[in-house]
Amino acid sequence: MFGRGGGTARGRGRFRIFPIVLFGAFFLYYWVSHQEEVPLTGRTQLVDVSREQEMALGLQSYQKILSESRVVPQGEVVEVVREIGRRLAAVSEDPGFEWEFNVIDSEQANAFALPGGKVAVYTGLVPVAENADGLAVVMGHEIAHAIARHGAERMAHQKLMQFGSIAAQMAVGEMDMGTQQAVMAAFGVGAQYGVMLPFSRDHESEADYMGLVYLARACFDPSEAPRLWQRMGAASAGRAPSEFMSTHPSHETRIRQFQEWMREAERIRAESCPAR
Ligand SMILES: [Zn+2]
C-alpha cells in the first residue's frame, strides 16, 4: 500500500510515511533521554518530569481531595494509620518526601499515596484490612506506587501516545475516510491493550513486590498479603471495580507472585526484626 500515489476516487488514497519516520526518530530520542531507574527493582522507566514537579502536583491533588472529603480528625483509626505509615515510610527508599497520613470517611475500601508522600486511607478499607498487617499491605502497596513514580511514568506514556496518534492521523490523512477510521481505531486498541494495560499490570505487580518488602522490613507479617488481596477481591465482587482493583493482575497471577516472593520477604523480616 505504500507509494500508491494519487489514488483514484475508488482507491484508498496515499499513505504518507514521513510522519511515521519523524515520530519514530522523536520516540527513540525521547526514550533514551528520559530513562530513570526504579529503586529496589532496578527496572528502567520513562519519566519526563522532575521529582519537584511531581511532588508539587501530588501536593496540589492531595489538598484538593482532602478539601472535598470528610477527613477524620482524630481517633484510634487515625493513630493506627499514622503509626503504620511512619513505620513503612521509614524503611522505604524515601526520596525525601514530606509524609502525611490522613483518614477519609468513605465506604470505599481504598487508599492512595501521591508523589511527595501524601497518603490517605478510606474508612471502608478498615473492615476489609481486618488488622494492622492487612492495612500495612495496602499502604505499603500505595507507598510503593509513589516511590516508583508510576503516575509520572503513565503521564509520559500518555504523552507519547498522543504524539503517536497525531503522526498516525497525518500518515493516513489523504486516504479515504473508511481507511482512516479503521487505522485510528486500530491505533487506539493497540495503544490500550498493547501498551497502557500491560504497563498498568506491571506497575501493580511492582507495587505488590515493593510493598511486600517494605512491610517485611517494618516487621509486619508478609503472609497477610495474599489473604488481604483475596478479601479485597471478595469485597469488590458484584460491584463496579474500584479504580484500585480494575487494572490489577489476575487473582491467580497475584497469588502465584506472592508465593514466589514470600521466602525472600520472610528472610527480610527475620533479618530486620531479630526479636521475633
Ligand atoms: Zn495499585
Image: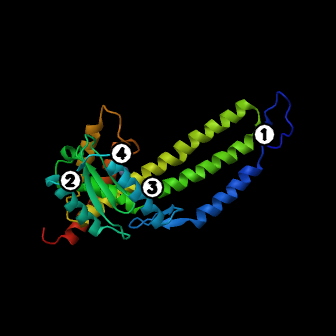
**Residue at point 40%, 64% (across, down):** 41
Q: Earlier in the sequence, mark 2 or mark 1?
A: 1
Give the residue at mark 1. Answer: 1
- Residue that label 2 marks: 73
Q: Of label 1 and label 4, which has the lower sequence position? A: 1
Task: Give the label on residue 151, or none.
Answer: 3
Amino acid under label 4?
Answer: Phe
> Three-letter amino acid code at disc 3?
Gly
- Contact (CB < 8 A) between labels 4 and 3? no
- The amino acid sitting under disc 2 is Pro
Q: Is residue 252 left or right of residue 136?
A: right
Secondary structure, mark 3, is helix
Can residue 268 be seen from the camera position used here?
yes
Give the foreground label among 1 and 3: 3
| Mark 1: few/some/many CA within 10 Å (<14, 14-19, 20+) | few
- In this rendering, the answer to whether 91 lies above or below 246 is below
* Residue at position x 20%, y 65% in the image: 219
Measure how far apart labels 1 and 4 are at the Cα level: 43 Å
Residue at the spot 45% in from the left edge and 61% down from the top edge: 54
Q: Residues within 10 Å of mark 3 (few under 14, many from 20)?
A: some
Of callouts 2 and 3, the N-terminal one: 2
Q: Earlier in the sequence, mark 4 or mark 3?
A: 3
Q: Mark 4 or 2, which is nearer the eye? A: 2
Q: Secondary structure at mark 4?
A: helix
Question: Helix, strand or loop at disc 1?
Answer: loop
Q: Nearer the viewer, residue 188 or 77?
A: 77
- Please identify, in this view, whether the residue under mark 2 or under mark 1 is nearer the observer: 2
Rounded to the nearest whole Å, what is the CA distance between mark 4 and mark 3? Answer: 13 Å
Residue 1 in picture, x, y percent from top left? 78, 39
